[in-house]
């Protein structure tokens, strides 16, 4: 075995003699000057196919004309040597042995070619590999130690190596990393050409994507990582994934891979298999991929189906996210499948019995049941009476009050209420409910609570041309007619004396529970008529002032706020005391009375409940005449009695 200093450098005389050489091999001169290559140099070598191609071309041109210095002698050379030497048997035997010894190396691969070997030992210098043909090589320990990915090497293990062309301590210097890298590039190119997949490990996260080790460092864009956008790329580090090479530039050493392409291919296969077996009515398990405002998309294993919000639950669903969330695994029923458009409609509520099937038998009309308010609308409130069953309480069925109020003023979502079933329509899935029916009708007790004649205090809620509505208590209004506002004033519009929000006192005049009406009166609170009727009686003479004249008579003000009517038939001219009885009386005309003048009248009729007083001017005149006659007769009688008394006194004196 030659000393190290005398070991010729492979390829130093003519680099083109090798079938394939790397850039590191061109610059190597001696073992000492060309130590084992670093991983960075290997990367350069792997990324320089042009250099390799040039070397291959040079090797083809010089094939058969150049022999490496350490190669065994050829048969032609041995024949010439045999002619020059003697033909003694000893030399012939020695030459035959020499030919046998070097016959195997003549068949060995050239430097730069990948060959297989077996590890025989691991020493301080490195890994000793048996290449066969009594040839051993050495993988330097530095190469094993500096490998980016730890290499597991054990004695007896088969291994692929590449000859560097150097020797050390009698060993052919080998490189496992170069062989592995060259093999990896070959696999990458093959996968790129044949559109097959490779397995790799995510080793780093860089801007825009990930770095995947597939024998060479490849770039995986974030958009090609999954079928859906991925937010956290760091979580993928150190994961084993399957990718496909989508772009390759061996000259620059650039490789772009896609995991999404593999997933799409698998998805297409799964989709075809699913479509062949999918049918309406089937029950399938799926994964919730996305939730929207109108439903959720379910991955059935290659094909997405839509689970509409109306098919999530038999009850009301405010938001689909209340029922399912992304990542949930659900069991759904195929409701409709359009094979041409590849659309699938799914149902979740169909996995449960329809609660409306027996709702009419369980909720009879008139039954009183508890419920919970789950929604409010302008026209009422939706009340859930059991899971999946809800009914509508119309705004008119919420309270006994006739006042219109928005449902939000009376209820709020989540309130527990008691309702009465008013109607059930199983075909239309509708139930009519009432809240006020579950309460005692206050109008039935109103007459007992506010009997006629009761003075109540209320707030003027509204004004109309014909009166004012006064709120007696929450939800109950009474009407004060315009004629019942004042005794003294002739009110044409309630707004003349009242305004909204005023607190007033009024007397209950009438209650109509059936019609739900209450009649009130303000002027009746201070009833001056009652006192007047108590102080006077029919046939009594009263003094009054004519307030106005009509064609049918004259209205006479008897007191503040008290008026009586003197009909035209009760009016005539006044007879003087000394007027003869045969003198005709004056005509029956209101002209006998004058507005603003005071006269005496006789009460001929009184109606306390209707506050009516009938007067007679003629009756008063007759009564006055009778009084005058009586007075006259009385005076006559007194004079006669005086004369008689005088005569009697005179007689007594005589």
Image (spheres, rainbow, N blue to C red):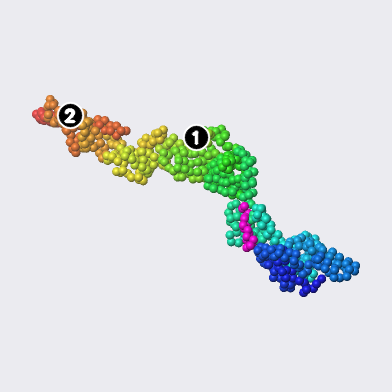
Residue 255 part of the magenta segment:
yes
Give the number of the mark in front: 1 or 2: 1
- Residue nearest the viewer, comparing 26 with 545: 26
Which residue is painted at 75% across and 67% down in the image? 66
Instruction: Give the image location of residue 304, x and y in percent.
Output: 59, 45
Instruction: Give the image location of residue 31, x and y in percent.
Output: 74, 71
- Residue nearest the viewer, comparing 626 with 194: 194
Mark seen at residue 422: 1
For label 1, the crowd category at 10 Å Cα-Cα, with few meaning under 14, some 14 to 19 and many 20 or more, is some
Residue 508 part of the magenta segment:
no
For label 2, the crowd category at 10 Å Cα-Cα, with few meaning under 14, some 14 to 19 and many 20 or more, is some
Quadrant (top left, top right, bottom left, bottom right) of the N terminus = bottom right
Give the secondary structure at mark 1. Answer: strand
Which segment is the magenta one? 246-261
Quarter where residue 255 is shown: bottom right
- Residue nearest the viewer, comparing 637 with 339: 339
Q: Is residue 226 above or below residue 588?
A: below
Res. 263 in view: yes
Instruction: Give the image location of residue 147, x and y in percent.
Output: 70, 65
Give the secondary structure at mark 2. Answer: loop
**C-alpha span from label 1 to label 2:** 68 Å
Res. 312 in view: no
- Judge from the rendering whether residue 81 lies leftward or rightward of residue 530; answer left or right: right
Instruction: Give the image location of residue 326, x and y in percent.
Output: 59, 49
Mark seen at residue 588: 2
Which residue is painted at 36% across and 42% down in the image? 462
Q: Is residue 564 above or below residue 17?
A: above
Residue lying furthest front: 83
Contact flag, marks 1 and 2 (Cβ < 8 Å): no
């Amino acid at each position: 075995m030659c000393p190290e200093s005398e070991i010729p450098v492979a390829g130093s005389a003519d680099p083109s003699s090798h079938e394939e050489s790397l850039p590191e091999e061109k610059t190597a001169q001696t073992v000492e000057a060309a130590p084992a290559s670093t991983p960075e140099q290997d990367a350069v070598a792997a990324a320089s196919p042009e250099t390799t191609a040039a070397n291959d071309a040079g090797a083809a041109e010089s094939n058969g004309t150049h022999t490496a210095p350490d190669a065994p002698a050829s048969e032609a050379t041995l024949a010439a040597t045999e002619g020059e030497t003697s033909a003694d048997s000893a030399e012939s035997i020695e030459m035959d042995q020499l030919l046998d010894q070097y016959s195997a190396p003549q068949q060995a691969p050239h430097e730069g070619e990948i060959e297989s070997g077996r590890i025989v030992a691991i020493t301080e210098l490195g890994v000793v590999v048996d290449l066969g043909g009594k040839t051993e090589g050495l993988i330097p320990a530095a190469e094993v130690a500096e490998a980016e990915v730890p290499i597991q090497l054990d004695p007896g293990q088969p291994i692929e190596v590449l000859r560097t062309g150097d020797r050390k301590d009698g060993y052919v210097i080998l490189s496992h990393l170069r062989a592995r890298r060259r093999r990896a590039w070959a696999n990458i190119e093959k996968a790129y050409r044949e559109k097959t997949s490779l397995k790799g490990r995510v080793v780093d996260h860089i801007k825009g994507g990930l770095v995947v080790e597939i024998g060479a460092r490849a770039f995986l864009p974030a958009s090609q990582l999954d079928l859906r956008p991925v937010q956290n790329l760091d979580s993928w580090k150190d994961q084993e994934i399957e990718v496909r090479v989508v772009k390759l530039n061996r000259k620059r050493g650039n490789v772009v891979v896609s995991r999404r392409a593999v997933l799409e291919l698998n998805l297409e296969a799964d989709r075809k298999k699913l479509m062949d077996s999918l049918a309406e009515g089937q029950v399938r398990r799926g994964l919730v991929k996305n939730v929207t405002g109108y439903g959720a998309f379910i991955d059935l294993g290659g094909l997405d189906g839509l689970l509409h919000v109306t098919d999530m639950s038999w009850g009301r669903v405010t938001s689909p996210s209340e029922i399912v969330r992304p990542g949930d695994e659900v069991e759904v029923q195929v409701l409709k499948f359009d094979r041409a458009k590849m659309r699938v409609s799914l149902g979740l509520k169909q996995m449960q019995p329809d609660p409306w099937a027996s709702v009419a038998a369980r909720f009879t009309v008139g039954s009183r049941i508890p419920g919970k308010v789950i929604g409010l609308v302008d026209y009422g409130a939706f009340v859930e009476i059991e899971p999946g069953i809800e009914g509508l309480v119309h705004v008119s069925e919420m309270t006994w009050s006739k006042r219109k109020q928005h449902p939000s003023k009376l209820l709020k979502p989540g309130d527990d209420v008691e309702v009465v079933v008013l109607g059930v329509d199983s075909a239309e899935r509708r139930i009519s409910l009432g809240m006020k029916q579950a309460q005692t009708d206050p109008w039935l007790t109103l007459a007992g609570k506010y009997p006629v004649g009761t003075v109540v205090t209320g707030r003027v809620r509204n004004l109309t041309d014909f009166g004012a509505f006064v709120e007696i208590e929450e939800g109950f209004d009474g009407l004060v007619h315009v004629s019942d506002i004042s005794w003294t004033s002739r009110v044409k519009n309630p707004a003349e004396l009242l305004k909204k929000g005023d607190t007033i006192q009024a007397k209950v005049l009438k209650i109509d529970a059936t019609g739900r009406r209450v009649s009130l009166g303000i002027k009746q609170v201070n009833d001056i008529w009652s006192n007047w009727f108590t102080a006077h009686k029919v046939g009594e003479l009263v003094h009054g002032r004519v307030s106005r004249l009509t064609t049918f008579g004259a209205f006479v003000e008897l007191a503040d706020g008290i008026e009586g009517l003197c009909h035209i038939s009760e009016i005539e001219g006044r007879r003087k005391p000394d007027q003869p009885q045969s003198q005709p009386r004056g005509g029956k005309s209101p002209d006998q009375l004058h507005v603003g003048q005071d006269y005496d009248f006789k009460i001929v009729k009184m109606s306390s409940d209707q506050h009516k007083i009938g007067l007679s001017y003629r009756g008063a005149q007759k009564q006055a005449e009778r009084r005058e006659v009586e007075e006259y007769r009385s005076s006559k009688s007194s004079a006669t009695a005086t004369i008689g008394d005088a005569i009697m006194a005179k007689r007594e004196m005589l």
